[in-house]
Amino acid sequence: MTRATAAQPDPALDLVLYGNLIFNNGWDAPDRAHGHGVYMQNAEGTKHIEDNLVFNSFSYGCHAYTEGGSIQGFELVGNAFFNAGAASPGIAIGVGGRPSRV
């Protein structure tokens, strides 16, 4: 078990996440499951998430989230996300935050 994830920080302009195998990441804490396969934010440019295989994440398979930042400009193509919520019920792909601009 690992706490690693493919995090994509907001300042990484026009980042490409391509052809990765991401699996068995996260941990089950008392409050909830932690650990998304891909976690991302974006304010400028486009984040390209393409041809990745992501499975057995403890929480979301892919999560775009913000608390006052931006979640815009994402292109997801040819990815496979499955078995999210390996430790407790999860979501394959989620977008949200408070407040945010989508």
Image (cartoon, rainbow, N blue to C red):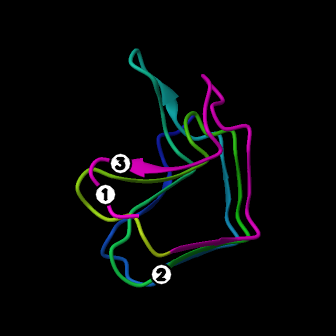
Q: Is residue 12 above or below residue 23?
A: below
Q: Residue at x 33, y 74 (%)?
A: 43
Please name the residue that numbered disc 1 is placed on. Answer: 100
Horizontal side of 84 relative to 2 (left or right) equals right
Query: How far from the left and from the top, in percent, is residue 87?
Result: 61, 24
The residue furthest top is: 30
- The mark nearer the N terminus, 1 or 2, is 2
**Residue type for callout 1:** Ser
Structural crowding at the residue carrying mark 1, measured as other residues with C-alpha within 10 Å and reported as few (<14), some (14–19) or many (≥20) = some
Q: Secondary structure at mark 1?
A: loop
Quadrant containing the N terminus in the rendered view: top right
Q: Would you name the residue on which mark 3 appears? A: 97
Residues at marks 1 and 2 touching, judged by CB atoms closer than 8 Å: no
Magenta range: 74-102
Task: From the viewer's side, name the closer residue of 22 and 42.
Answer: 42
Q: Is residue 81 magenta?
A: yes
Q: Quadrant of residue 53?
A: bottom right
Considering the numbered disc 2 on the image, is that residue within a helix, a strand or a loop? loop
Circle 3/circle 1 CB separation < 8 Å = yes
Q: Residue at x 43, y 21 (%)?
A: 29
Q: CA distance from mark 2 to mark 3?
A: 19 Å
Q: Is residue 20 above or below residue 4?
A: below
Quadrant containing the C terminus is bottom left
| Three-letter amino acid code of the residue under disc 2 | Thr
